[in-house]
Amino acid sequence: MADAGNRVRVWDAPTRIFHWLLVASFAGAWLTRDARHLDVHEFFGYAMAALVAFRLAWGFSGTRWARFASFSYSAPAAWKYLAALARRRQAHFVGHNPAGSWSIYGLLALAALSVVTGLVALGAEKRLGVLAGWFGYRVGDIAHELHLWLAYAMLALAAAHILGVLAGSFADRENLVASMLSGYKRATGAAAGVDAKYGIAVMIVLALGLGALAYFHAYPPAGGAGRVPSLALALDLAWKNECSGCHLAYHPSLLPARSWSRMFDEQESHFEEDLALSDASLQHLRTYAARNAAEALASPVAWKMATTIPAEAAPLRISATAYFEERHARLEAATWERVRPSACGTCHRDAEAGTFAPGAMIHVDLEKSAGQDGK
Amino acid sequence: MSTWRSPLAKMANSRWFPRRGIALAAGLALHAAASAGPVDDLLQQFRAQGAGNFTAAAGAQLWERVALDAKTGQARRCALCHTDDLTRMGKHATTGKAIEPLAPSVNPERLTDRADIEKWLTRNCKWTFGRECTPQEKGDVLTMIRSR
């Protein structure tokens, strides 16, 4: 099996830089999947979108082995290659082998779909990004779910791709990972090497670098917290002054209108207190609450509250609702011995604003923060 | 300038400005200024309702009185939230929210808004004692708070 082929440049620089930047972006997006790092996660999504867009263009205008035309194989061809690989009888391909080609197209498609579903979810649930407000919360919820499935599918395919690269490397006795770094592979016959096209590779790196600078530098910090700008819910000074006398001024979007109505009707026994609000004050507060209750769907939390509280229920205690319990299920029971459920501001910087963005949460060291509850 | 004397000293020693007159005038002016506050307005109102002779001592006694809540049996008193030392931060007994000190000497915003005073007296007397405070009790406790 003496292969007397010489080593030529097969992968140009733009293809290589694209590959590794995509790997880094996917890894980065995966590591920042926690909602508290949404701003960074979003950046990696934009990076992947730009990289995939470039690859699609380069697939038609790049050097020989980067073009899609050079690695378009049918599904049967891919299967045949895998079967041959299993018997160590595979042929040597200068460019991508048939099976590898399919995983490439699969990864590109999954990346593109992840970006799209991510943008839809972001625009629908958080009202941010290029698709801000395009869809309602229900669509956003579905898109979010799809986004998760696609991410796991992409992880699985990436794992398969890595296994394939390792298997192919051993079978062909060629370090394919090193090839994707240096660009050089063993060529057969009269295959000539391609140009490196370093200039374009440099432009790609510059574009992403400048993009990162603009992205992270241009975001205004939301209340000194995480960099995700929050939605702006309607606030009322009278509401804040009245309610924050004893507790956080809970935003009306956290309960349906019928809850607030019931609360004001029963103001003489508001959690054992007689509020004794004046008629003028009561009227003002009723109006503000009715207009900005959960049904107004001004925030993702409002939507969840409006759709999960049974129609016949008018709960007065936010922390006793199913959605609250679902969101706080991860906390240990011991947490509630140190922090009152009614003291939202202990962990949520934007509690009074009513938005409860994950990016605006603070990590509270419960050992040290004894006595600071109730803020 | 060893023989310079202040205008005030000159006035006080002048035949034309009786000292007692100045003292009286100053006293009246100060008294008039003090009456303009919301607490005094409320005290006037309480007097009109039959109460009188408000003392800080009586207010302090009310402050320490313990009442049992009819429904839960919880022992309630003013100090439960506001503490016995009005110059210190308090803490809401149910929500745990921090409460600014009540003493005007430490917190100048206290006792400056009449509607505010009335609202909280109504609400908190009801919670603590299960009933509205009488005008006498309100006058006493305001007199006490003002002195801290």
Image (cartoon, grey):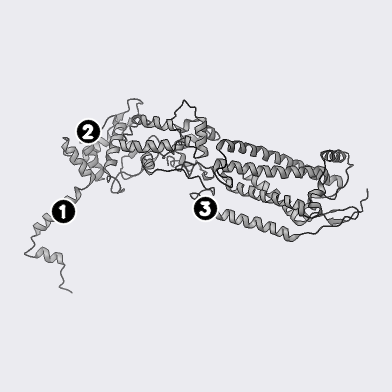
x%, y% of residue A155?
Answer: 70, 41
Q: Secondary structure at mark 2?
A: loop
Q: Is residue A225 visible?
A: yes
x%, y% of residue A341?
Answer: 46, 35
The nearer-to-camera label among 2 and 3 is: 3
- Quarter location, residue A197: bottom right
Q: Is residue B78 visible?
A: no
x%, y% of residue A127?
Answer: 54, 44
For the residues marked 1 and 3, what is the alpha-carbon distance in whole angstroms? 55 Å
- Disc 1: which chain? B
Disc 1 target residue: B29
In the image, is B8 to the left or to the right of B126? left
The nearer-to-camera label among 1 and 3 is: 3
Is there a contact, CB below 8 Å, between mark 1 and mark 3?
no
Q: Secondary structure at mark 1?
A: helix
Q: Amino acid at mark 1?
A: Ala
The answer to whether residue A296 is above or below residue B31 is above
Foreground: A307 or B76?
A: A307
Marking on residue A220: 3
The answer to whether residue A190 is above or below residue A360 is below
In the image, is A118 to the left or to the right of B18? right
